[in-house]
Image: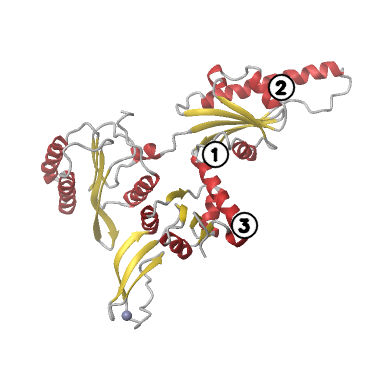
Amino acid sequence: MAETQTKMSNIDKYRFRRALEEIEQAQGRGTELVSVYVPPDRPIFDVTNYLRGEYSQSSNIKSASTRKHVMAAIESIINRLRQWKMPPPNGLVAFVGHKDVGADQTSMIAYVLEPPEPVPSFLYRCDSRFYTEPLHEMLAEKDIYGLIVIDRNEATLGLLQGKRIDVIKNLESRVPGKHRMGGMSSRRFERLIELAAHEFYTKLADVATEAFLNQRELKGLLIGGPGYTKDYFENQGYLHHELQKKVLGTFDTGYTNENGLRELVEKAKDLLQGLDLMREKALVQRLMEEIREESAGLAMYGEEQVRHALALGAVDTLLISEGLRKLRLAVRCGNCGHEEEKTVTDETTLPACPKCGGPFTVVEKRDIIEEVSGLAEQTSTKVELISKDSEEGQLLLKAFSGIAAILRYRVT
Ligand SMILES: [Zn+2]
């Protein structure tokens, strides 16, 4: 199955995620939202026959409006599937139905999509919600790293998954401090410390086994901490041998708590270069460096400025925040016919025509990320979608209005 799988580009994944947001918001007034999953090896005529069966079944539905909606949904799916004989390499998913829009009104929502990974088996479901759970698994970041930060007093385990760091457990040791109790020989005290430390490392290794060994996609293990303890723990064979094989390296960190996990990921940066988070961080940092240059160097930010640079073909890499929720509208004045393009966050509050004060109507509507990416593709500009998960991603979204560019040459 893995060989036939087509890898989705970032922008395709983004489109898919956006579609999913809308699909998941939809709620039917009855059990009338139809979800269909078609695996890649299932001939479409086969699916169509199955759906015809469901169609005749649904004529028995008691509620007239639910019956009407279910039948319309199935019919719509059959029509939409007509363009294929066999599904595309990952199969297809269809979500069609009438969603409740309040005030006793419904509106039709219809999506037929190719998912990011192959659909494993055929599924038909009619419910008041669309069935999307399997798609989340497909969209999840698959590179997972185990994280351990440790010194003699404390250890924290975490998982780095895509861009996210999750704390699994924080452990405190019972290793005594520097001050020995009165009457105890220093040798005996040393020995007590060694024993307690050994116990702590053993316990930590057990927790690590439990946390990491069953992570199918675990790519590697990173170990950090302020002193030699991390190295001792790593090279004295405490870890389960399967985990030991996955150790990518040890790194100095100042902390052994949640902050230590963040430090560890930061320190292991070169190692994890392939990870999206690192890519994103590096891109935004590069942008920042350019901005700090005299007269902003090879950087540009803000929607209008970047549009200008794109039009000149001067953009090498376009950085867009996935958190951007804006629309690019083509509007026309109903009174004098004046046309212009506008970027808005809400299409219901359009300004009046600047020429005559008449009302604008929307002629065309596009998601701004798709629209600007389209402009970039025309000039062979690399497009990088930056998540809002990292500090740098937040910076791009908030300080640079979500759109910035690294330029091929300076633009004035
Ligand atoms: Zn006008």
Q: Quadrant of residue 369?
A: bottom left
- Answer few, some or many: residues within 10 Å of disc 3's Cα (few below 14, many 20 plus, some between 14 and 19): few
Give me the disc on residue 410. none
The answer as to whether callout 1 falls within 8 Å of ligand 1 is no
Q: Horizontal and vertical percent for residue 381?
A: 42, 52
Near-viewer residue (385 or 394) = 385
Look at discs 1 and 2 and give the one toward the viewer.
1
- Answer few, some or many: residues within 10 Å of disc 1's Cα (few below 14, many 20 plus, some between 14 and 19): some
Give me the disc on residue 165. 1
- Answer few, some or many: residues within 10 Å of disc 2's Cα (few below 14, many 20 plus, some between 14 and 19): many
Residue wearing tag 3: 293
Ligand 1, image quadrant it occupies: bottom left
Q: Amino acid at mark 3?
A: Glu
Residue wearing tag 2: 197
Measured in 3D between alpha carbons, the distance from the residue under mark 1 to the one under mark 3, in whole angstroms, is 32 Å
| Residue at disc 1, secondary structure | strand
Near-viewer residue (167 or 387) = 387
